[in-house]
Structure formats: C-alpha cells, structure tokens
Image (cartoon, rainbow, N blue to C red):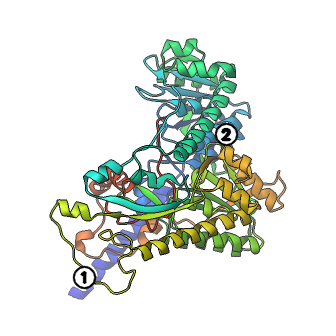
Amino acid sequence: MKKAIVRILATLGALWLITLVIMVIAISQRKGSVPSKTILEANFERQMVEDIPDEPAAKALLNDRAVLRDVVDALDRGASDNRVLGFVARIGAVRMGTAQVQELRDAVTRFRAHKKPAVAFAETFGEFGPGNNAYYLATAFDQIYLQPSGDVGLTGLMLESPFVKGTLAKLGTRFHGDHRYEYKNALNFFTESKYTPPHKEAMTALMNSWFTQIKDGVTQARHIPPDQFQVLVDNGPYLGQEAVTAHLVDGLAYRNEVYDQVKKKAGNVAELLYLDKYLDRAGRPHEKGKTIALVYGVGGVSRGKSNYNPVQGELTMGSDTVAGAIRAASEDKDVKAILFRVDSPGGSYVASDTIWQEVVRARKAGKPVIVSMGDLAGSGGYFVAMAADKIVAQPGTITASIGVLAGKLLSSGFWDKIGLTWDEVHVGAKATMFTGTHDYSPDQWQRFENWLDRIYVDFTSKVAEGRHLPKDRVLQIAKGRIWSGQDAKALGLIDEVGGFDTALQVAKKAASIPESDEVKLVVFPHRKSFIQSVLEREGPDNSDKEGVSSAMLEMLRTVQPLARELHALRVGDEDLGDDVLRMPALEPGR
C-alpha cells in the first residue's frame, strides 16, 4: 500500500513538474501583436552586447542587455513594415564603443531612408562628463530634443591609460617580459610610467581618426560647416539653450512632451513598442531564402568552450566552440557562406590558430567566409579573421595589433615584505621558467625570445598570405600597432567599411546570391531555449549548491565591476602566457 501511495505521489509530482515546464515555455513563447500604428521605441542608455551565450548564467545576468544584431534587425524590419510609422529613442549616456555607435547610426539612416521619422531625446549628453559618442549617435536622427536642464558635452576626445610600474615597485615586484614589437603596448602598463613614443603615436592616430569620423558625421547631419567644428568643440560643453542656439539640438523639452509630439504626428492612436518586443512579434528579416551561417566570436580568445564568466561579466571566445561552429557550417550543404562576427581583444595564440585553421578549411571546402568586426578585433581577434575571403569593419573599429607579448610578474620582493617564504625542488633546467619566484635564467630567456619570434613570424606570414600583401609591407604596418578601421582599410588590412548590413551583402556576393534575393541567417552553433539550457545541464555537486538564488545573481552583478578591474590589473596572475595575442584595455574619456 505504501509503495502504491509513493508511486502515485511521484507520478503526480512528475506531472506537476511537466505542467510547470510547459507553462513556462508557453509564457516565454507567447507573443502579442504589432499595433496597426506603431512607433518603435529604444533606450540606448542600456548597455549593449554583441551576443548572449547559450548558457543559463549568461541568459540570467544579461537578460536586460540589448543585443546589437537585434536592434539592427528590428530597425531594418520596421523600415519596410507599413504598421511602423516612426522611431523614438532615449539617448544620453551610451556605453558603447565608436564602432557600435556607427552600426546604430547606419541602421537609423536606413530606417529614415524609407521616409519614416526618427526622433532622439536626451535628458543630457554627459552630465559633468563627456557626451561625444552619445551626441554622435543622436545626430543620425531627424530631430534631437534635450531636457531643459540638460547639456551637450561635446568637448573633444581624450584617451588615457594607467601604468602600474611605480605601484609594483612599492609592492616589491616587477614585470619581466617582452613584446614584438615597439607598438605592442600592453606591457607598458607594467613596465613604463607614461606613454613611450610609439605608444603615444598609435594612440594619437586612433584618437584623431575617431575625431575625424565624429566631425564628419556631426557636421553633415547638423549642416555645420566643417571648418567650424573645432571651434564648436573647443567652446563646449553647451548648457541647455546654448545647445539650441548652436544648432546642436532642435529644441528643449521633457520626455513626455517629446513622446506626445511623436505620437501626435503619427496619429493619436499610435502606440509605442520596444524594439525587442517588436522583433519578437513581427519576426526578423533574413528568415527565408538561401542559408548564410552566422558565427559569433566574442570575448577573449581561449582554448576550450566559449563561456560567460559571471563574476567578471566577460565573454570568452572558446576555440572548441567557434572552430566547431565554423566546421559545422562548412559541412552543412544548405549553407552558402559564413558570416563571422568578431569582437575580441585577442588572447591565446594556440586557440586563435585553431580558429584560423577552420576558416582556411571552410574556404577550401568552397564556403566563403566574411568577417564582420565589432568595436574591437585586435591581436588574436585579428588573427582569427585574417584568412577570411573579405573583412568588413566600421571606421571606428580598433583592429590589427599584429604582434605578440608575454612575461611574468616577479613577486619575491612582495613575499619578503609580508614575511612569506617559498622553497621548492625541481628537475629540469627550465622547470622554474614560469614561476614568479624566479627570474628567467639566460638559457630560459633565450628560449622565451625564440618563442616570441616564432609566433611573430607565424602571425605576420599568415597576414601576408591571407591579405595578399607583400611580407615586407606587413612587417612595416605590424609591430603590434593598433589601427582604426578607416586606417586599416587604407592599409589593406580590411576590405570594406561598414557593419552587419554591408557584411551580409558582401557574403551574398561571395556566394553568388543576387543582391535582391532574400537570405536566411542561421546562427551556428544552433541556439537552445532557456529551458532547454537549464534542463540539459548536469545537476549540482551537492545540496549546498541547489540552484542559484536571485540574491546570488544580484551579488554577482555587484562584484562584476571590481572583478573586471582586478582582472585588468592581472591580480592573481603569475604570467601572461594565455594572453600573448591580447589587446591592452583602453580608457577613453569620451
């Protein structure tokens, strides 16, 4: 009798669980309708990401982030939708790089080309801070309105970098490493107190390229004579009415006044609809026709699977995942071309080479590979891209950094200061090569230098091969130097300037698909629903780890900024062995 009762209760429990799962899936998939008169709405003050990995932690912690491709697709879909009458967006403190801003500007421009108005509203463009990129984005719209108490922080650009050589000295430590060559400036963070001449040269060139791009965009959109732009910037920031007088904005108004005006022009029954809701209900563009695979390579390059680090809040481009996705796409008979979206500071040389080889294999299999670069595709991020048929980047993309660096932090002095002693035994002449308690011996240092030379030769040789450039020319423009996408185009390091839309057109051409034909974009590896991701993962190791509470998620969000800063300072790292092809972090005062 007891066994029967237990079976009945177990069955009821299983049915209850199944019902709950079905309800969650049904609710998650429930869609409303698109109103007959719709005004698309966006909040561009939300942080935007390139991709949300197919794993529960990322989906839980990044669910409030806008995905760049979703925003672009929604605007492109809405441009040709008769139900959509216009677009209004809140802008003001955009947390985006220059290339992301340009991607959105391009999408807004395409939307407006269908004779549909786009209006930007900002409480302020930089409150006691720079608002250059935010204002640059806003100038893609037909009209810009500023809250009466707001400002336009159009003040010029500044790039600044920290240096910890003095800090390390106070701690009794120093960094010992090397790079190829003088422009590979990440080591300067550890070994210098200020910019070296090559470091300063590269940073200045990047800053000036960005400034020119902002100047061109703002002056064309706001009908400002280009020769007056520098004076305009030098007189900033602009307070409220000053911005109207300088023709930087079209008027002063509060949010409700701006949005009511937009609704009135579209018809009193017009309804606002967020871009993500619209995309869910209306469907994406590029959902029928011949198939083009979309593969994301986002985050630092590492061996293994792509993942999301919930503590640091960072994505990882795992060579197993990305190489496997490219391999699967190249073996899929329905796929006509591969669109490889790269946004990465680089990382592991070996992992980068693994992905590079799959790009080469895909091309040999007859599948064109087109790279679309995001904000950053440098060092290992450029390595994975350089064998593609074509490379497309925004003018503001940071790319190249063709070089290598490595080294280790010598920490014995620090341990002496706190009274911690070490002892060891070893076998092998080079067994101490990677510990921070011993400096390199002359023999170890020679092998270390040979290692860097080998990587640099391999990197530059593959650039010359992939980009069809003379090796001597590659050696002139490499040396670890970063370039803006605009400058990279002039140097032959990329092929086209543009974003997703441009790269997709290039992919269609490479696959011999007529320009007017629709195509179907399919993400590789194929995505699972949130429920599938949860159900397919292994259970916890013990009862102490049953699930992750919402409080835990909030704690992770809280510690992410600190964890990222500690990671940037390499706290806890003995060496940079996995980051030989990694870009330095930039601190732009934009």
The circle on residue 106 is 2
Closest to the observer, 539 or 357: 357
Three-letter amino acid code at the position of disc 1? Ile
Q: Is residue 540 left or right of residue 335?
A: left
Rendering coords of residue 45 (x, y %): 47, 37
Quarter of the rendering containing residue 129: top left
Q: State whether residue 452 appears in this view.
A: yes
Quarter of the rendering containing residue 2: bottom left
Whichever of labels 2 and 1 marks the residue nearer the N terminus, that label is 1
Q: Is residue 584 left or right of residue 35?
A: left
Q: How many marks?
A: 2
Closest to the observer, 25 or 276: 276
Residue farthest along the left direction in this orientation: 419
Rendering coords of residue 550 (x, y %): 30, 55
Q: Is residue 70 left or right of residue 549?
A: right
User: Pointer 2 and pointer 1: residues touching (CB < 8 Å)?
Assistant: no
Could you say whether the residue bearing mark 1 is in a helix, strand or loop?
helix
Residue farthest along the front direction in this orientation: 442
Look at 27% across and 54% down and name the residue there.
551
Rendering coords of residue 46 (x, y %): 46, 41
Look at 66% across and 53% down and name the residue there.
477
In the displayed structure, 404 sits above or below 323; it is above
Three-letter amino acid code at the position of disc 2? Asp
Q: Is residue 303 left or right of residue 333?
A: left
Q: Nearer the viewer, mark 2 or mark 1?
A: 2
Give the CA separation, mark 2 to mark 1.
65 Å
The circle on residue 5 is 1
